[in-house]
Every structure is written in structure tokens, then in C-alpha cells.
Image (cartoon, rainbow, N blue to C red):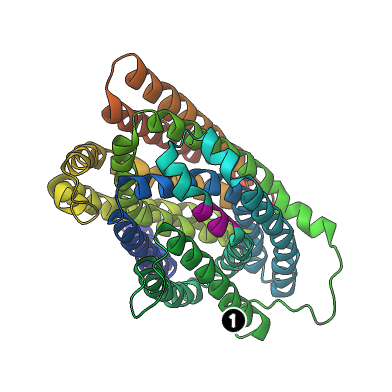
Amino acid sequence: MSKAAVTVATQDVVQARKRVLALAGPSLAEQFLVSFVSMADMMMVGRLGPAAITSVGLTNQPIMFFQAVFMALNVGTTALVARLFGARDTQRASDAAKQTLVVALLSGVAMSLLSVALAGPILRFMGAEPDVLELGVSYFRWVGAGLVFNALALNMTASLRGAGDTKSPMTINVIANVFHVITNYLLIYGPFGLPALGVVGAGVSTTLTRALSFVLFYNILASGSKRIKISFREGYALDWPLLKRAFTVGLPAAGEQLILRSGQVTFARVVSGLGTVTYAAHQVGMNVLSMSFQPGQAFAVAATTLVGQGLGAERPDQAEIDVREARRLGVIVGCSMAALFFFFGRQIAMLYTSDPEVVSMTALVLRLYAFVQPAQSTQFIYAAALRGAGDAKWALYSTAIGIWGGRVIIGYILIEFFGMAIMGAWLGMAADQLGRSFVTSLRFGTGRWKSRKV
């Protein structure tokens, strides 16, 4: 390669880095804030005892299963809006955002009603013991009731990110999460003469926070002050051809989400059979681990948007450079999280609980999982790029292989036949991430995603 060609290639990477950081920077700050708030949430609940931790953990799995419906729609929303923005068709991008928001409303209402009606049977299916079931049903109903607000807020976030605006979601989530921490403290512990609602207070706080997020997002999009505008003043008419384009990406993503969430629910049932204390340690570990998801997810947001915009502008070469740079940066940040887990896992666990058995088990699995961080960041970013390109089927394949072949099957075998308890469960999780990383890296490397249509 000539010196001039090397210079051009270097300049392309530098420009890609700027584009990635412009999108991923606000998203990374937002994701870390969300993670820290989630950790603070669990720390507050953790002070109520292992049964409280387990009730929240067992509720979160089916709630995330319900969320899979509209989360998949949001993948199609981001990909379509990004593709239209890349083609400089901003009016159609706004139309796409409006169309998918109505679908998000309908699916959100359905998920809220199911959550409230089926809270008890679902928790019993999850293997909740009597002490957990008593706490969990009311918490489940409160969190489930707010899923409609969650659906709407996440859909509007997807539209803004597709348009290249990651700062507005960051700002709104800062406000919402500060509100969440305050209301959590007030409703869980009941200071200043307020009733101490315990775990139920955490559920009420979650729904109030999601309602606030919806109001703030809608005000921004209805005002037209950003790159995209949603207005219902002139009414609503179904635009099936436009929705079909979103569903082209969203339906495979829906399949992926259902495979992922059903695997996670099955896995949670297996781990819950190890007892309340062990599941409490697992849940604390998962809550801490969510902090390590953030770098991968933030750079995944950038990858989805930049792939869509690059292909919309008919620049697949630029899209590839952007994604590879996003992956490189994501792995670097992820490795810093790995060091934190490896060396300070026990100290982190002690922030959640004073139970020595829970602390010891949590520290052990965090040290194990530190070695999986590069694979985790890689699969987040490459899978997001494939979805953004409209090649969502391969993200689905990778999830099916990882979650069922690794997490569920390998985890189950190690727990049931080798007696490895929580260590077997987390080795299964490690196999999941390694499998997904291998499949997504292989598919992205073929370059076939460049010719996909949205």
C-alpha cells in the first residue's frame, strides 16, 4: 500500500472515530447512569434481605420477556429512520417514527394488562418460594402497569437515535433517573412520615419514572425542536408500506428477542432452584454485570445508526469502517470494566448486602466473567450493526446458539450433572457470549450485510 493510501485510510479511521464518539459518547454516559441507578435501586432493595432481592430478580425476567415485543419494533424503527435520514428524506423519517409509535402504544397496553393479570401465576411458574411470592406479586403488578409508558419512551428513543440524536435521550434519562433514585428512597424506606412500602415502593417508583420519561420524550418530539417531529393534530392514517419496512427488520429482531428472553426465563428458573440465597447472589451479580453491558450497548447504538445512514447514503465502505472502529473502542472500554470486576468484585458485592455467603458467591462469578468482556462487547456491536443493515436474521441465529446452546443447555448440565451450582450457571453465561461473538463476527466479516434492503 502506498504512503498516500495509508494516509487516506488513517484519515478515514480518524473520521470514523469522531462519528462513533459523537453518537456513542452521550449514549455511553446515559447507559452508565442507567446502570448506576439500577445498582442503587438493587442496593436499596438489598437492604430488605435476600427474599426482596430474589423477588425483584424473578420479576425482571418475565417483564423483560414482555418488553421483547416492543424492543424488537424499536430495532426496525432505528434502522428505518437512519436509512431515511441517510437518504436525506427527513419527512418520511418523521412519518416512520409516528407509525411505529402507534404500534408501540398498542403493544404496550397489551403487555401492561397481561402483567397485571398474570403476576401471580407467572411468579409461581418462575419457581418463587412462598416468602418471595408474597413480596413479588405486588411489585410485579406495579412494574407491569408501567410497561405502556416504557414502550412509548423506548420507541421515541429509537427514533431519535436513528436520526443521529443521542443527546436528547441522555438528557431525559438523566432527569428521569435522578427522579427514580429520589422516589425509590422515599417510597421504599418512608422517611419524613411517608409510608414505608418496601419492595412495592420500588415498583411504584419504576412506573412513575417511566411515565415521566414518556412525557418528556413526547414533548420534545411534538415540538419539532430536534431532527424529527411527531404530531397527531392532523390525525393518524395507517401507512402499511412504511410500517412493513420497519417490520422487515423488526420481525427477525422480535424472533431474536423472544428466543433471548425465553432462554433467560428458562435459565432463571434453573438457577432459582438452587435456593433463595444462591439466586440472590446470582441477581446481585447480574445487576453488577449490567454495568459492563453499557459500553457495548452504547457503541452498538452508534453502530446501528451509522450503518443505516452509511447504507442510506450508498457508502457501505464508510459503514464498515465506522462499525469496526465502534467495536475497537467498545472492547477497550469493556476491558476496563473487566479489571474492575476481577480485582474489586467482593467490595462491589458488599455494597448490596451484608450476607457473607451472597458476597462470596457474587465475587467469585464476577471474577470469572471478567474474562468474557471482549466477547460480550463484540457481539453487542456486531449484532447491532447487522440489525441496522437489515441483516437481523444473523443476530437471531447468534442469539439462538448462544442463549440456548450455551447459557441454558451448558449451564443446566454443569448445574444438574456436575453439581457446580452458581459457577456452572455463570460458565453457561460465558459460553453464551463466546458463541454469539463468534457467529456475529463471522457474518459481519463476509460483508453480505452491505447489500441488504430496508
Tag 1: amino acid: Lys
Answer with the quarter of the image where residue 26 lies. Answer: bottom left
Does the magenta stretch mainly form a helix, a strand or a loop? helix
**Residue situated in front as seen by the camera: 331 or 320:** 331
Residue 11, horizontal then vertical, whole percent:
36, 64
> Where residue 128 sits in the image (x, y, percent)?
45, 37
Say if the magenta span includes residue 56. no
> Dot 1 corresponds to which residue?
226
x and y percent of residue 233 in the render? 81, 82
Mark 1, other Cα within 10 Å: few <14 / some 14–19 / many ≥20: few
The total number of labels drawn is 1
Compared with 236, 296 (above or below) is above
Q: Label 1's element?
A: loop
Which residue sits at x=66%, y=52%?
111
| Residue 229 placement: quadrant | bottom right
- Seen as rendered, the residue at the extreme top is 417
Tell which of 81 and 159 is nearer to you: 159
Vertical side of 370 occupied by 296: above or below: below
Residue at position x 68%, y 44% from top?
A: 251
**Can you see residue 2?**
no
Q: Is residue 68 visible?
A: yes
Task: Identify which residue is drawn at 77% across, 57% down.
Answer: 243
Between 52 and 27, which is closer to the camera in this rendering?
52
Q: In this view, does 338 lie to the left or right of 195?
A: left
Q: What stretch is highlighted in magenta?
A: 138-144
**Which residue occupies 39% across, 61% down?**
198
Q: Is residue 183 left or right of residue 351?
A: right
Position of 276 with respect to 209 (left or right) is: left
